Amino acid sequence: MTTTSPDSKIPKPGTSDPKIIDGRAIAKTLTARVAEGVRAFHAETGATPGLAVVLVGNDPASEVYVRNKALQTHRAGMRSFMHMLPETTGEAELLDLVARLNADPAIHGILVQLPLPKQIDPVRVTNAIAPEKDVDGLGEVNAGRLALGIPGIVPCTPLGCLLLLRSVHADMRGKHAVVIGASNLVGKPMGQLLLAENCTVSIAHIDTRDPKGLAREGDILVVATGRRALVQGDWIRPGATIIDVGITRVPAADGKTRLAGDVDFDAAYPIAGHITPVPGGVGPMTIACLLHNTLHAAQLGAGLDRSGLLDDLRSESAS
Ligand SMILES: Nc1nc2c(c(=O)[nH]1)N[C@@H](CN(C=O)c1ccc(C(=O)N[C@@H](CCC(=O)O)C(=O)O)cc1)CN2
Ligand SMILES: [Mg+2]
């Protein structure tokens, strides 16, 4: 049976509603697999993969995310290096730190938490990370590789979304995939990944004339706008698969706060074929994919010829 929280019909994670794509469960399986890979890497090379996470400022949500990243990095058997810099940090100082991390052989992955304070250009900073350590996959080299279909490091959130989609679609060929939101972090790389699955891809953005009409055509709908409950029931094609990337903290009925997505879950649930909850959908996959990308970067850095997650899973589903 599916249980609900007091202020929403969102089922508790771990319940067995086949409509719900359980990101927590899928992330747990992936994380266990990464931990196994870390042990094998250590046995083969004597080294331990290391991830450096850089946070600039005191954004409370970012603080939670980087703490979780550090915790899970340790749990997967990897080394975690945290750099917490004040809000007033200048771009040159941050670029200097990135250069030192690039040169440090104990560090295989570097991630600069976004958003950055306004005095720092995020594009300049992400491009300063050495491509082979760019575990967020946001720099121009990895973004270019994704666009060209060349193996590289794939951004964590869209990669997580793709794995969630693959958990319910063995084959996405020919499906119309509609992505709402065209950010560098999610929308654009998501579009590339869906194109690589041979979907017909539409990306809606701020100037799209009729985003609701476009969304209604999607067999697959990925929503990443940061606008809470933007997508209502009448945006959804009956039976569509809905991936909700949004995450906003809102007041709850009990006077506390709760997390809500870009999709009105209660309105979407009866119409959708499959749907991710918030929390417990895309969020946990982002961190599991980061752990995967860090191990993958360490393997490539050690000259071990390992395929990445996309290729691993493609060959698994083919077998
Ligand atoms: N450099 C990056 N910055 C940001 C990224 C990113 O991939 N790289 N993504 C987001 C934030 N993010 C990771 O950094 C992230 C967001 C949410 C979660 C998550 O586990 N969410 C849980 C709920 C957690 C909570 O209680 O607050 C869930 O949805 O179930 C993990 C990572 C922006 N910045
Ligand atoms: Mg989620």
Image (tube, rainbow, N blue to C red):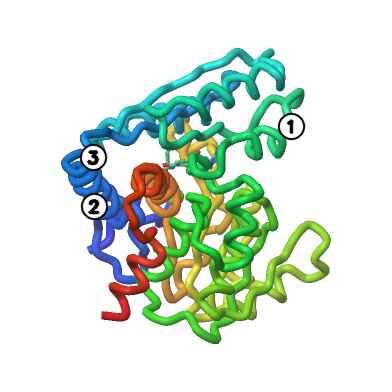
Amino acid at pointer 2:
Arg
| Percent of width and height locating residue 122 | 69, 35
Label 3 or label 2, whichever lies nearer to me, is 3
Quadrant in the picture for residue 236? bottom right
Q: Is residue 296 left or right of residue 172?
A: left
Label 3 or label 1, whichever lies nearer to me, is 3
How far apart are labels 3 and 1 at the CA level?
Answer: 37 Å
Residue placed under numbered mark 2 in the picture: 33
Mark 3 nearby-residue class (10 Å; few <14, some 14–19, many ≥20): few
Q: Quadrant of the C terminus?
A: bottom left
Q: Is residue 184 left or right of residue 104?
A: right
Q: How many marks?
A: 3
Amino acid at pointer 1:
Asp
Amino acid at pointer 3:
Thr
> Which residue is at 69% across, 57% downward?
182
| Percent of width and height locating residue 284 | 38, 47
State which tag comes first along the sequence, 3 or 2: 2
Residue placed under numbered mark 3 in the picture: 45
Residue placed under numbered mark 1 in the picture: 121
Does the rendering let one see residue 181? yes
In the displayed structure, 294 sits above or below 200; it is: above
Which secondary structure lies at badge 3? helix
Determine whether label 3 and label 1 are within 8 Å by CB.
no
Q: Quadrant of the N terminus?
A: bottom left
Which of these two is toward me, 110 or 71?
A: 110
Which of these two is toward me, 141 or 232?
A: 141
In the displayed structure, 106 sits above or below 85; it is: below
